[in-house]
Each structure stands twice: as C-alpha cells, then as structure tokens.
Amino acid sequence: MKKVLLSLFVLICMLVSVRNVQAISFSEGIKDSKPMALLIYANWAEDISDVMAMFKVQEAKYSNTYNFVLLNIASEDTREFNKKYHIYPNLPYVLLYKDNGKISRYLQKSCVLDDSCFTERLDFFTK
C-alpha cells in the first residue's frame, strides 16, 4: 500500500512540475524580452523523461533569466513555429532564443542531459 501511495505521489509531482514549466506558449515566449529556452519534444522520443527532468532543474536555476517553454511537435504552436523555423530530427532538443527570435542556438540532447554543458550554454547565451 505504501508503494502504491508513494508511486501516486511521485506521478502527481511529475505532472505538476511538467505543467509548471509551460507557463507561457511559444508565441508568447518569442515576443517576451527575456531569453527563452524551448524544449522541442515528442512523447515517444528516447530519453524524454530524463530530458524533461534536466529541463526542470535548469528552470529552477534560471527562472529569473529565461522563459522555459515546452513545444510538443503535435501541438497547435508547432504550426506557428514551423512558419519561421523547422523541426530538426533527433528529438528532444533545446533551442535558445533572444531578441524576439532573431538569435537562436541549438542544444543537442547530449548537452541538455549534461548539467555542466546546459548550464554553460545558458550562461554564455545571456552575455
């Protein structure tokens, strides 16, 4: 019984934490003056739970500096995203944007999963 309750608690915490990451949409984030870290993913993508967890860690560290936004390739925002950008293969990955989407950087999954690499890129991009 304790294992079931603990599993349920962990599941609820994960759902709440993933929901909190998506405070704004892509279209809102691209117009904001704050840089944006955009996680492009699909539910079927390899290592998605690990990438989501690391994205949440970085959001906790950089929420004052960056907007953290999720973009599921099956969402409505994908159409708007594809008007100007295109979805790269090898999901999931992170794109960093500033200056209303004029400047962006691509972070491969391997960098996103490496705390020091992800942190270094976030720090460098805001300079």
Image (cartoon, grey):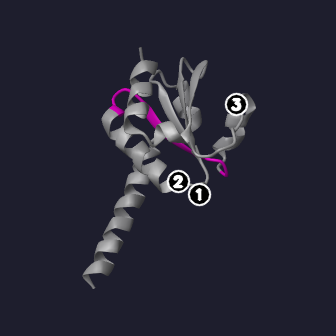
State the quadrant of the C terminus: top left
Q: Are marks 3 and 2 in contact (CB under 8 Å)?
A: no
Q: Nearer the viewer, residue 45 or 79?
A: 45
Q: Nearer the viewer, mark 2 or mark 1?
A: 2
Q: Are marks 2 and 1 in contact (CB under 8 Å)?
A: yes
19 on left or right of 83:
left
Q: Nearer the viewer, residue 72 or 115?
A: 115
The type of residue carrying mark 1 is: Asn
22 on left or right of 95:
left
Res. 25 visible in picture: no
Residue at 47%, 56% in the rendered image: 49
- The answer to which of marks 3 and 1 sits earlier in the sequence is 1
- The answer to which of marks 3 and 2 sits earlier in the sequence is 2
Give the labeled residue for mark 2: 48
Does 30 sit above or below residue 22? above
State the quadrant of the N terminus: bottom left
Tell me the number on the disc at residue 59: none
Residue lying at the far left of the rendered structure: 2
Give the labeled residue for mark 3: 85
Residue at 58%, 55% in the rendered image: 46
Give the labeled residue for mark 1: 43
The type of residue carrying mark 2 is: Ile
Residue 25 position in % (x across, y down): 54, 40
